[in-house]
Image (spheres, helix red, strand yellow):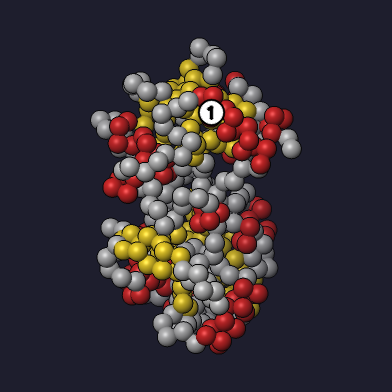
């Protein structure tokens, strides 16, 4: 594994989002492997923020280089959790400096690294969208499909998430693939499942960065005009059980809010974090559609909205801050006190109602205890 020049060495980085597939092993991006001509040694050294060095073995499977032996020990020793982001900076001599970002910190952007989605071309036949990795079985099935259909242009492979299949969500197409293979004007396109005759008209909307979205884009102001408002909105990647949905609909009907009620399911990060105080994730699309334009103007920080919380039937209020970016929004300051005083637990439901004509932004919080949602 030869060393890049000094200029390249300071820039050669890649980012990985930790999920269930990464806890026991991690795939090295193919573009990084190709940069070194496919020659990655059997052991690399990972340097943690505290200076400790970990030897991690590199194995190969389905033409992919994988950090495996010693990786689980590195994850455990550095308290890496799901949804953390890791930035690997190459230092030379098969050594990497690893910076860990938790889900409440500002993660490095794509501009800060060379791990770009347009380089996720795993073969000349298909492109893998987003920061994800396929299992060996998934990759084998894709190769079998390619042999069968012989595509004329590279196929786009998307690992589906709950946010892609819930109502009123979108499928994001990365700009590099969109520029190469999609029309350059917003229009209606047709999708069809293989070996099926039914056509599915779908809205193709071009984004400013050159990429495109399939489906209804909630962040688009002209697309939302005249659209009926849903009675409530959930965070990304969240689904309610039937019992939870029934209780939520009953409560929402009783609240009678002009704007959709925001519904959050409490988890470990929102009620009891081990190393830092709890925080509550908030759907970016809810903030961009219903709050940002009215409440962010004139604030000292463009990415912060002052938020006052009040529980139903109580007089006490909590001054908090809603911190948002293009891909993540959280209630941090003041949330720990609210969660503690109101004895919030995992799987409790919090329903947030925007109080009209209140400055700064004020939301009434209705709590549905988890015992009420047992099937």
Q: Can you name the residue that lies furthest to the right here? A: 375
When the figure is inspected, residue 27 is found, relative to residue 268, above or below; the finding is below
Say if residue 106 shows up in the picture: no
When the figure is inspected, residue 336 is found, relative to residue 41, above or below; the finding is above
Horizontal relation, residue 100 to residue 67: left or right: left
Name the residue located 56 percent from the left edge and 87 percent from the top edge: 148
Q: Position of residue 60 (x, y in %)?
A: 62, 78
Q: Which quadrant of the view contains residue 344? A: top right
**Front residue (pair 273, 36):** 273
**Front residue (pair 65, 364):** 364
**Front residue (pair 353, 258):** 258
Check disc 1 and report the residue beneath it.
253
Q: Position of residue 314 (x, y in %)?
A: 54, 14
Q: Can you name the residue that lies furthest to the top here? A: 315
Q: Which quadrant of the view contains residue 303? A: top left
Q: Position of residue 65 (x, y in %)?
A: 58, 75
When the figure is inspected, residue 69 is found, relative to residue 83, above or below; the finding is below
Q: Residues within 10 Å of mark 1 (few under 14, many from 20)?
A: few
Name the residue located 41 percent from the left edge and 82 percent from the top edge: 153
């Amino acid at each position: 594994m030869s060393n890049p020049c000094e200029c390249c060495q300071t820039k050669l980085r890649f980012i990985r989002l930790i999920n269930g597939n990464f806890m026991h092993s991690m795939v090295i991006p193919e573009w990084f492997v190709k940069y070194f001509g496919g020659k990655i040694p059997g052991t690399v050294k990972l340097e943690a923020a505290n200076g400790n060095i970990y030897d991690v073995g590199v194995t190969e499977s389905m033409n992919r280089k994988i950090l495996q032996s010693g990786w689980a020990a590195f994850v455990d020793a550095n308290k890496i959790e799901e949804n953390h982001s890791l930035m690997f900076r190459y230092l030379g001599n098969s050594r990497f400096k690893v910076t860990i970002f938790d889900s409440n910190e500002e993660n490095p952007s794509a501009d800060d690294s060379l791990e770009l989605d347009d380089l996720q071309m795993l073969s000349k036949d298909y492109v893998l969208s987003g920061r994800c990795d396929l299992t060996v079985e998934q990759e084998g099935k894709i190769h079998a499909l390619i042999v069968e259909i012989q595509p004329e242009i590279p196929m786009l492979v998307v690992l589906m998430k709950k946010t892609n299949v819930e109502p009123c969500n979108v499928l994001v197409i990365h700009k590099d693939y969109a520029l190469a293979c999609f029309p350059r004007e917003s229009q209606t396109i047709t999708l069809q499942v293989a070996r099926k005759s039914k056509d599915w008209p779908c809205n193709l909307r071009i984004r400013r960065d050159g990429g495109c979205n399939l489906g209804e884009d909630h962040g688009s102001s002209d697309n939302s005009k005249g659209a009926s408002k849903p009675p409530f909105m959930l965070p990304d990647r969240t689904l309610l059980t039937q019992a939870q949905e029934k209780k939520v609909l009953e409560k929402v009907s009783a609240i009678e809010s002009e704007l959709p009620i925001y519904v959050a399911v409490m988890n470990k990060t929102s009620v009891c974090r081990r190393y830092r105080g709890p925080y509550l994730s908030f759907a970016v699309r809810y903030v961009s559609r219903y709050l940002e334009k009215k409440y962010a103007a004139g604030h000292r920080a463009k990415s912060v909205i002052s938020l006052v919380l009040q529980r139903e039937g109580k007089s006490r209020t909590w001054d908090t801050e809603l911190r948002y970016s293009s891909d993540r929004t959280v209630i941090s300051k003041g949330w720990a006190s609210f969660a503690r005083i109101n004895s919030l637990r995992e799987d409790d439901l919090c329903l947030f109602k925007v109080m009209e004509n209140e400055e700064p932004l004020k939301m009434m919080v209705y709590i549905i205890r988890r015992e009420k949602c047992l099937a």
